Amino acid sequence: MTAELNPRRLAIVPFAQTGARLSGVRNGSEFGRLLPEPAGSHGVGQVFFEAFGELRRNAQGAMSTWIGLAARTTMPMVCQRCLEPVDVDIDFSREFRFVATEAQAELEDDQSEEDVLVSAPDFDLLALVEDELLMALPPSPKHQRCPRPVKLAVADKDFVVAEEVVSPFAVLGQLKTPKV
Ligand SMILES: [Zn+2]
């Protein structure tokens, strides 16, 4: 069954009605919006995703359409402490309720704390994966342990200034040194 489902064109309602499941691995290059700018020497890692559909009864007794979605990948980012590249693992796991129309989605998204989306017979599940991964990116990525001493990066400006102040004396010293 899983082989017949296309995550780029997923029929949401039947997926939920049948309690279907879908999982896969996609190349990171398929997710254009995740690519770093400028493109680094290494790209986004593979994106692992899995989804399940479910019908649930709401408080009023009506059936509603739900999709659970989770994904993870590794993103090449720049460490905000040492400014060296850092691979950041990101993931999310969320559930979405689907309704029939845009108007209904807007109305219900405001009224409830649930994430409400518009159902479609050809829903792009991987675009939703991409949206969620983008939102899961850390605003300030850092190494757990920076590969180089942090002091150098933090004190960089002072370090350069100190060198400039010192260097004329260093040059004088060199001039005074008798050459043999
Ligand atoms: Zn670092």
Image (tube, helix red, strand yellow):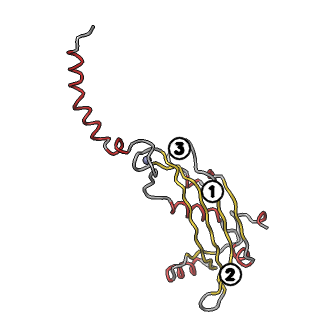
Q: In x, y percent, where is residue 38?
A: 50, 45
The N terminus sits in image quarter: bottom right
The x, y position of residue 176, in whole percent, is 20, 15
Mark closest to the chain's N terminus, 3 or 1:
3
Which residue sits at x=61%, y=78%? Answer: 101
Ligand 1 within 8 Å of the CB at mark 2? no
Q: Amino acid at mark 1?
A: Val
**Where's residue 109, x and y in %?**
53, 79
Work out whether 146 lies above or below 60.
Answer: above
Q: How many marks?
A: 3
Using the numbered discs, state the Cα–Cα distance from disc 3 to disc 2 in whole angstroms: 42 Å
Depicted 25 relative to depicted 22: above or below: above
Instruction: Left or right? Give the position of 46 relative to 84.
Output: right
Closer to the camera, 133 or 89?
Answer: 89
Label 3 CB sits under 8 Å from any ligand 1 atom: no
SS at circle 2:
strand
For the C terminus, the image quarter is top left
Q: Residue tagged by mark 1?
A: 47
Identify the image quadrant of residue 172: top left
The amino acid type, in three-letter code, at marker 2 is Leu
* Kind of residue indicated by mark 3: Gly
Question: Circle 3 — which element?
Answer: loop
Q: Nearer the viewer, residue 38 or 158?
A: 158
Residue designated by label 3: 40
- Mark 3 or 1: in front is 1
Q: Earlier in the sequence, mark 3 or mark 2?
A: 3
Q: Which residue is mark 2?
A: 55
